[in-house]
Image (cartoon, rainbow, N blue to C red):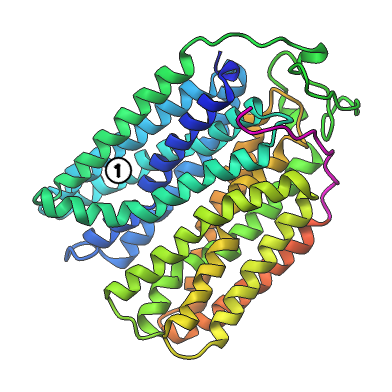
């Protein structure tokens, strides 16, 4: 059973999955930028392409989470999801090879839906595997290390594409990424199915050495007793999970609304144009999370998780406001993008470390899907649309839109503090 895999193997395989998943997901905008130069592909169609991608992710993640809780095999399903994501890249390749017309547009939409469906698997399932393997054992740090690999893939994939394109003429480099993804999917599927030595079980199904939490009402929540089977939907839909989903949604609307428009702001308002400086600035923003996610993971293991999550939202708001106040396009100003990325792309360890405190065991995958799929992903889809509506056809309004989004981030931070205080858990060595 997937939930019995060891901590080292679990962290290694989920980190590999996070690297491939996030690298591929953030590679999709590069493909969109390529096809945007086709004469029959309009800006409206590009918007529809992104909406198809994000909507399929948000909707399917709920089904995936519930299925994983029922089957008890999140790792195997995670491998399947990465395979679907990689096949989506192959469909994008087919689309890129089309000369144009309805076939091109239809194939692009099919590829967007397929890659979106594949992207629905990783976060709820990878989080569930880590929550089971590291229960009471520095879960925040494990999620942070795992998230750092996702951030690394996010930062490297666009650049790796252009490097591969030098070696492989045309769009063949897309096929290379698809093949790498399929190989990783197979490794994860086999690795999580491989039998391991079962661990001794303490009463109530907890691992030996893991302190049992005090019982709460049957509806579940912080300290809810462990269950031998999948939790019911009512057990997962606790007040804590619903409110955490709302916080994740508002936080993502604000932060992703800003992050998605940063390249356009740099290009049109900071004078970077379409240049290597633009690419470097965006890479620095994303790469900041390679440091930030493990650090925030350590903090949630030691401090009140609500305060750490609230601080990250406030940090994002403060960083973008300072950035807007700094004139010119020099690196002293652009360095604040690093600070913004440091606080912004920290949601994986912060949100998913809280999930386990608000649901009984056996409902983690569905709860992760609610908080990440409906909360973070759907919010991340709506944010860029709202910023775009404020901007209209005048890019000079981006600064004003960013200021409003920063205010929404502050509101999400205040809402975080209304969450019920999580129960502290015993910390043990991550790799012990």
Q: Is residue 152 left or right of residue 30?
A: right
Q: Quadrant of the C terminus?
A: top right
Q: Position of residue 106 (x, y in %)?
A: 25, 46
Which span is picked out in magenta? 418-432
Q: Is residue 148 left or right of residue 217?
A: left
Q: Is residue 195 above or below residue 73?
A: above
Badge 1 crowding class, 10 Å Cα cut-off, few under 14, some 14 to 19, many 20 or more, is: many
Q: Is residue 352 left or right of residue 305?
A: left
The mark total stands at 1
**Residue, disc 1:** 111
Q: Quadrant of the N terminus?
A: top right
Closer-to-camera residue (237/409): 409
Element class at badge 1 = helix
Identify the residue at image location x=71%, y=9%: 200
Identify the residue at image location x=53%, y=59%: 382
Residue 63 appearing in the image: no
Q: Position of residue 7 (x, y in %)?
A: 58, 25
Identify the residue at image location x=72%, y=34%: 356
Closer-to-camera residue (140/262): 140
Q: Position of residue 117 (x, y in %)?
A: 42, 37
Q: Is residue 177 above or below residue 2?
A: below
Q: Is residue 146 above or below residue 217?
A: below
Dominant SS in magenta: loop
Q: Is residue 40 above or below residue 234?
A: below
């Amino acid at each position: 059973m997937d939930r019995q895999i060891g901590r080292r193997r679990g962290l290694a395989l989920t980190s590999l999955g996070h690297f491939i998943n996030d690298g591929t997901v953030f590679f999709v905008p590069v493909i969109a930028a390529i096809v945007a130069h086709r004469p029959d592909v309009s800006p409206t169609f590009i918007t529809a392409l992104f909406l198809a991608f994000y909507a399929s992710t948000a909707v399917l993640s709920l089904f995936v989470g519930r299925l994983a809780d029922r089957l008890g095999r999140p790792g195997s399903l995670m491998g399947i999801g990465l395979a679907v994501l990689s096949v989506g890249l192959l469909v994008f390749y087919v689309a890129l090879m089309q000369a144009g017309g309805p076939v091109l547009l239809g194939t692009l939409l099919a590829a967007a839906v397929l890659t979106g469906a594949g992207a629905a698997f990783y976060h709820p399932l990878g989080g569930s595997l880590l929550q089971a393997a590291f229960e009471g054992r520095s879960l925040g740090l494990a999620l942070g290390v795992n998230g750092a690999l996702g951030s690394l893939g996010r930062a490297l994939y666009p650049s790796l594409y252009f490097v591969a394109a030098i070696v492989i003429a045309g769009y063949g480099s897309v096929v290379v990424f698809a093949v790498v993804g399929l190989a990783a999917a197979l490794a994860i599927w086999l690795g999580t199915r491989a039998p391991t030595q079962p661990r001794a079980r303490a009463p109530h199904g907890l691992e030996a050495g893991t302190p049992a939490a005090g019982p709460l009402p049957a509806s579940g929540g912080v300290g809810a007793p462990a269950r031998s089977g999948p939790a019911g939907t009512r057990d997962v839909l606790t007040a804590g999970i619903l409110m955490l989903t709302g916080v994740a949604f508002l936080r993502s609307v604000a932060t992703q609304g800003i992050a998605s428009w940063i390249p356009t702001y740099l290009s049109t308002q900071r004078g970077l144009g379409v240049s290597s400086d633009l690419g470097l600035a965006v890479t620095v923003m994303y790469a900041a999370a390679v440091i930030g996610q493990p650090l925030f993971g350590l903090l949630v293991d030691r401090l009140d998780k609500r305060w750490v999550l609230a601080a990250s939202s406030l940090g994002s708001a403060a960083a973008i406001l300072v950035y807007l106040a700094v004139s010119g396009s020099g690196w002293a100003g652009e360095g604040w993008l690093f600070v913004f990325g440091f606080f912004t792309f920290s949601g994986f360890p912060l949100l998913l470390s809280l999930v386990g405190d608000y649901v009984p065991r056996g409902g983690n995958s569905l709860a992760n899907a609610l908080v990440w799929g409906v909360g973070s992903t759907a919010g991340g889809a709506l944010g860029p649309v709202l910023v775009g509506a404020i901007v209209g056809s005048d890019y000079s309004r981006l600064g004003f839109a960013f200021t409003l989004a920063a205010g929404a981030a502050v509101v999400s931070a205040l809402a975080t503090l209304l969450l019920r205080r999580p129960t502290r858990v015993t910390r043990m060595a991550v790799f012990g």
